[in-house]
Amino acid sequence: VVAGEKLTPQFFARATPLVAKDLLGKEIVRKVNNVWLRARIVETEAYLCEDDPACHAFNGPTKRTSVMFGPPGRIYVYFIYGNYFMLNFVTEKEGSGAAVLIRAVEPVEGETEMFRLRGLTPTSKSRIQLTSGPAKLCLALGVDKTLNGLPLDLPHLAVVQGRAVPEEKIRVTTRIGISKAKELPLRFYEQGNPFVSKK
DNA sequence: ATATGGATGCAA
DNA sequence: TGCATCCATATT
């Protein structure tokens, strides 16, 4: 049922910008309501453990950010703006406090269930709305805080090798929606993919 | 352009 | 305890 090899903690135990870039094209796999969901990562952002005030872990471990200081390859989910969840994966060696935010994915399998989870009726236009943003994709994939702190594994959530993004289609820009460290080039996406979030 | 929503963290 | 802030979205 799973296409490709599952990523191990070692994949995530590296420099965060490199992990963020290498996650492009990988696939998130997860079973929700007894349905397999699969989605290809097309946009990510790195949040660093050093000199990055936009990173939740910037001021050291707290109740919320303790997961970020745990082992690499764990799931970090947080709640924001009173409505939304954000999906991240912990990076670097244990104790660092860094992560990659998943900002957009492209549906690969289980699209009907994604529409249902997202509360949308299937049309060609709403298809893009399904997963073209960090909170949208959490809704479409049924991601919530119950996943926070868990290791990547099935059936709850794993990341597998997908269809790689060719180097020439990878773009790097500044991160979206933050007020600090705006200038750092830590957002990665697949050029031309319609699911990449709009500014 | 604007309303929305709750958790978090820090000042008081 | 109070309050500004926060990695966004949907609707006007």
Image (spheres, coloured by chain):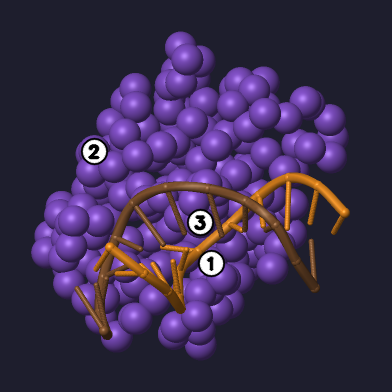
Chain colours: A purple, B brown, C orange
Q: Which residue is mark 1?
A: A188
Answer yes or no: is residue A165 visible.
no
Q: Quadrant of the N terminus of chain A?
A: top left
Residue at left offset 12%, top offset 64%: A95
Residue lying at 47% horizontally and 15% vertically, measured from the top left: A33
The label shown at residue A81 is 3
Number of on-image labels: 3
Q: Horizontal placement of A183 versus A59: left or right? A: right
Q: Position of residue A111 (x, y in %)?
A: 65, 26
Q: Three-letter amino acid code at disc 1?
A: Phe
The secondary element bearing badge 1 is classed as strand
- Three-letter amino acid code at the position of disc 3: Tyr
Q: Are marks 2 and 1 on the same chain?
A: yes
In the figure, residue A113 lies in which quadrant? Answer: top right
Foreground label between 3 and 2: 3
Is residue A167 shown left or right of residue A7?
A: right
Which residue is label 2 attached to? Answer: A150
Q: Measure how far apart labels 3 and 2 are at the Cα level.
A: 23 Å
The CA distance from mark 2 to mark 1 is: 25 Å
Q: Nearer the viewer, residue B4 or A92?
A: B4
Q: Which of the chains bears the disc numbered 3? A: A
Identity of the amino acid at label 2? Answer: Leu
- x, y percentage for residue A30? 43, 27
